[in-house]
Amino acid sequence: MRGDRLPLDPSLAPAGSRNFRDAGGLPAAGWRADQTEQTLVPTHCCFCGVQCGMYLRVDRHGKVFGVEPRNHDINRMRLCPKGINAYQQVNHPDRLTAPLLRTSRDEPFREVGWEEALDHTAERIRRIQAEHGRDAFGMLGGASLFSEKTYLVGKFARVALRTRHVDYNGRLCMVSAAGANKLAFGIDRAANPFADILRTDCLLIAGSNVGECFPVMTQYVWGARDRGAKLIVVDPRETAIARTADVHVALRSGTDAVFFNAVLHVVVKEGLTDKAFLAERTTGWAEVRRTVEAYPPQRAAETCGIPAGQVVEVARMFATAPRAMAWHARGIEHHTQGVENCLTVINLCTATGNLGRPGAGYGTITGQGNGQGGREHGQKADLLPGGRSINDPAHRRQIAAIWGIDEDELPPAGTSMVEMVGQMGRGEIRGLIGVCNNPFVSLPNLRSVRAGYDALEFHAQLDFFLSETAADAHVVLPVTTWAEDEGVMANAEARVVKHNKAQEPPEGVRTDTWVLCELARRLGVGEKFAFEGSREVFDELRRASAGTVIDYYGITYERLEETGGIAWPCPGPDHPGTPRLFEDGRTYHPDGKVHLQVVEWHPPADPYDEQYPMTLTTGRTVAHFLSGNQTRRLGGLVEQTPRPWVEVHPSHGFRTGDPVRVTTRRGSTVLPALVTEAIRADHVFVPYHWPVPVAANELTVDALDPRSKIPEYKVCAVRIDPAEALDEVPAPPVPPGREAYPEAQVSRTDPLPPTAPQGRGTAERG
Amino acid sequence: MLGRTIFIDPGRCIGCQACVSACRECDSHRGRSMIHLDYPDEGTSVASLPTVCMHCEDPVAPCAEVCPADAILITADGVVQEADPTRCIGCANCVNACPFGVPKIDLAAKLQMKCNLCYDRTSYGLAPMCATVCPTGALFYGTVEELQAERPGVEVSTLFAFGGTTVATGVAMVVPADRREPVPGGTLNLIEVNGRPTPGNGAAL
């Protein structure tokens, strides 16, 4: 029987479903099961660091209207709800299609032409820098940009703006893991590919809600268990992967270093270390060994709030497995000792000889699509392309030569994103260009963030939807989505993948590359930004990375299309890439050894007292992504999870749906309770994807790790009280005279929390 | 007996609802998801359970048996199709008859809606959308041999007991080895009729 004999006449479509794909630009009447009149463009998802392959469905008018699973070896056709709905952003009614401009924040935006918007922006840059010095103008990038664009952000800041003040939103995400990797291994990336998970005998996942934040990675976790591997999950919440784990260590947030030091204590005490590995391939073991002596299981039991027996159980399970692996994410990284927490995991893997073999190793799961690539090529305050240090004279000379400038023209290292916001508040930074970030939702202690941005004399923001941050700017420049340009991203395995262009941008929209090059031309350095598009930028990036640890020289667009992705380092066109590190037993330090680091635990920055006795921890939910500027506009995802909630243990006496005031030293918000035994009684959890007045980050503390400068999102002191009425979820911002696409916002005002952290069950929907 | 079909393994489900979103993308449903995704342990754990149409074989499709308009047709491949909209009268008999709670009624359109195993896709040689995208393999499409090759030792069942009635289905469920079949589907609420116990429905006789 052929599909076209089924009743596919749109007049028979169920009521209410007719406009379903309006956000995709194709009326229901144009639907067909017959797939012959469409083009499938192979690409990857725009969201998380797994970087699942997908096809975008393009109709005969050249418009993206749907998604089709793609058998790419990262994801084997699998997709999460965000990935499935991602295409609906492309022709979404909320898209920005004209530059917006105003000279003061009291005025409404008016739509202007590109010439006026760019001339005005260049004029303000010149004026602020003439009056207050070059460093008075800053730039903030993002790790959801293609690597080509992250390279351009760094080059634009150093060569066109010539400011030291450039950083990016990976500072909120990946920097703790990066710092630890560099200290221990001299290379900043996961050591093993996802596929190695299938070959391990013991998998330890610390501080990562894999089922919600990296859903498609779960197939590797379950695949390992199908083959008999043990699963250990360290998380204060009983997440979907923790629920059936062999051991779930539900420790207090902010005590990870005690737990991992104690595990290593037991490993040493029971003689389970790999003595030959430690002797031949490491430095610093004697000091680490001496330090963990002071962390017996009983200390972990008291500090972490777990049974002492669990420490012993984890130590034996991990250390006696023939091949063991550890993966971690923000749960242990978003701390004032984020770098050190990662180091304790590295110490455990190293002491048990679990490095550089199939199924044995270590990885960190990047949160953003290009969380890995975004930190490699120079948009970070202290780095130049190829992971070079901006403080190293030799590195400075190399990059100055590639860029055709004098080394003394190259600015020194700048400051981190959170520190830059403080400098804005103090008038040290007076103008800013933001690309691909939304600090009004994503930064901690939002009150001080707004104060910083509001003090700016000039603020331009590039985005494809009007984010909460862009809505506060002077100039908003409408740029492309990922489906309207080509470029590469590096996923959590450091595998570089190619995103392809599926449709032309809507009229009035330009690529970020074009915008930065046009601004550079107006600032008098057009010849250094003569890029036609991503391909030309990538060629320069390849050359700029050649010979460094992060070597992209052998990676070309053609090779990526042939192979489906290549892991760096890849120094030459015949080099197969490096999916697994340390196979030859050497790290990337000059001595080739793992540099073990001593870690002493200290308590979190925000102290507990009678007023604030409990712990607030924050994180993601599966239907939304980061600041929600994209996912809060997609109807299916809003319906799944319409609003934030506060997750509390039943012992506090609330019922699900009760309004609960959540108060920290920085602010408060009223959210509906989701009462569940799947969280520690002394913790509450709030997801962070929404803006004020329901923003988790109104509550979080802006204390930073001294090395990585990552904020301590995962732990602060909190109080919960009964409240009268819920704070309402605002609609996502849109330009004046428009309304956020109503069909996508239907569920937003729903007062109830989701049925479970993953969303509203289908039976509980209106 | 089992050909290429869906296998459901709630133990792997992470409740992400990719299946719900994927079902919405299917061209035969046009924005409506037919998948039921429940969090049955609400308040206790994050456990979750996807339900698709089980495509009952014996007794053949209770939903079709009770349809007064003969709107629910079963194709030769065993797929219980969605009610034919030119015949369906929206009476909801099928909703009441289904032991798994699968069919839904669109009240506005007065039409039944139900999973048809993505017939528009399977008839073009594509796998159903939900099982294709499921991040964890909680929904798996293929043969039992393919399933067992991927997951050594896995057991499945297609028999479900509801009181005294056992239903054989075309869609299979992964079950613990010691609970192989029939899977207890629960006791029907109908215990007494006219004051007398109804045999086989779990009532004390």
Image: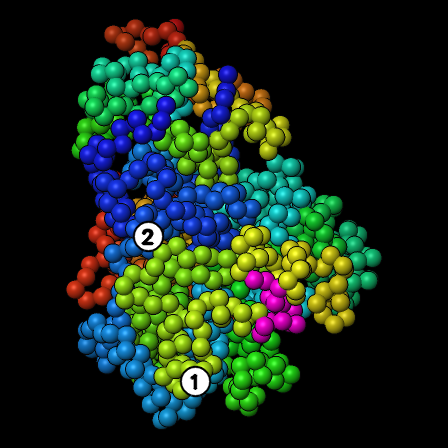
Disc 2 element: loop
Q: For this view, does A135 lie left or right of residue A591? A: left
Depicted A575 relative to depicted B109: above or below: below
A614 or A508, which lies in front? A508
* Sooner in the amino-acid sequence: mark 2 or mark 1: 2
**Disc 1: which chain?**
A
Badge 2: residue crowd in 10 Å (few <14, some 14–19, many ≥20)? few
**Disc 2: which chain?**
A
Asked if the stretch drawn in magenta spans residue A549, the answer is yes
A463 or A275, which lies in front? A463
Disc 1 element: loop
Q: Amino acid at mark 2?
A: Gly
> Residue at 59% across / 40% down in the picture?
A223
Determine if residue A644 is in view: no
Q: For this view, does B93 lie left or right of residue B134? A: left
A745 or A101, which lies in front? A101
Q: Amino acid at mark 1?
A: Val
Residue A561, percent from left and from top: 53, 54
Residue range highlighted in magenta: A543-556
Q: How is the image coloured?
A: rainbow
Residue A525 marker: 1
Pointers 2 and 1 in contact (CB under 8 A)?
no
Residue A691 marker: none
Query: In the figure, residue B59 lies in which quadrant?
Result: top left
* Residue at which label 2 appears: A62
